[in-house]
Amino acid sequence: MEILSWPQEAATPVRRTLTKGKIMKRIMVALCLTLLWSTRALAASLFEQPVDTTLPGLYSNVGRVEVADDFTLAGNSVLTAATWYGIYGVDLNPTVTTIDFSVALFDNAGNVPGTEFWRQTLSATVTDSGMTVTDPASSFFGRTIYAFDSSLGATPIAGGVPMWISIMEADGDTPATGSTQWLWSYNALTAGVKHAQRSFDDTGAPEDWNRWNGTVAFTLYGNVETSVIPAPGAVALGMLGTGLIGWLRRRQIL
């Protein structure tokens, strides 16, 4: 009887070890997922010009007029997404969820857009921003100000260097002419701030850029490319994960 009892006693710690192994592996998975979330959360707003709701906006539609505004990032970065704002002469049907836009990036050439180095037609998600044009004297008073969101892929931009972004509405299901076209919402309208505009000739070729008063509303998102010390939370998770891996190996669970 004593001989039979030994395997039973030895088996109990083995079952406890396996249970601990499963638990620790689950903890490691959770830590990895948390670390991944923490890393993604580092993407943030790199540049922002908010909406001035007292002002309407500027027409910017494919084949008609192209509006561009300049921006300068604090450091070398990778743009990943953008949000811009605008109105229509007539509010959109609430069932509309996406609108096509032509978005381009340019370097700077004498305070106007220079060489175009990136352009794509993007299907932007459209939502009601909760804002409306608030100037009773405006013909657009009460119009809904929409927010448009889209990915920009992963586009590297040098820091400290003036750049330009242009956005034109390019959706075939919305009016291309007339007062119901899209207008890019103003950020400010004073002589001290400028944007650029260009028209298109009868063949559809773009004409020269010209500077005009005012800036438009948009936000750029992405990641700063520097040798930045990781966020404290990410460091703590990494240290904890390393310690757990060592412990698991010593226990011969991994």
Image (cartoon, rainbow, N blue to C red):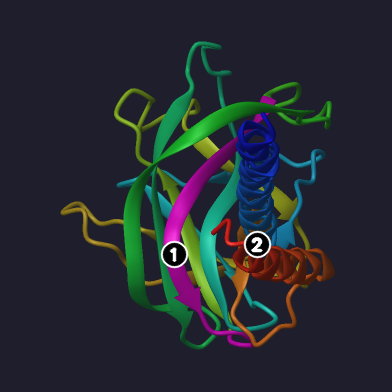
| Residue tagged 2 | 251
Residue at image position (69%, 35%) is: 2
| Residue tagged 1 | 154
Label 2 packing within 10 angstroms: few (<14), some (14-19), many (20+): few
Q: Which residues are magenta?
A: 144-161
Image height of 19 relative to 93, above or below = below
Say if the magenta span includes residue 238: no
The x and y percentages for residue 191 are: 76, 69
The image quarter in which residue 153 lies: bottom left
Residue at image position (75%, 31%) is: 138
Left or right: 110 with respect to 215? left
Say if the magenta span includes residue 145: yes
The x and y percentages for residue 20 are: 69, 44
Q: CA distance from mark 1 to mark 2?
A: 42 Å
The one of 211 and 228 positioned closer to us in this rendering: 228
Image height of 97 relative to 106, above or below = above
The x and y percentages for residue 19 are: 66, 38
Can you say which quadrant of the picture contains the N terminus?
top right
Q: Secondary structure at mark 2?
A: loop
Asked whether the residues under the numbered discs 1 and 2 touch, taking CB atoms below 8 Å apart as contact, a structural biologist would say no
Pointer 1 or 2: first along the chain? 1
Q: Amino acid at mark 1?
A: Ala
Q: Amino acid at mark 2?
A: Arg
Left or right: 229 with respect to 8? right
Can you say which quadrant of the picture contains the C terminus?
bottom right
The one of 147 and 27 positioned closer to us in this rendering: 27
The one of 42 and 174 positioned closer to us in this rendering: 42
Q: Main secondary structure of the magenta part?
A: strand
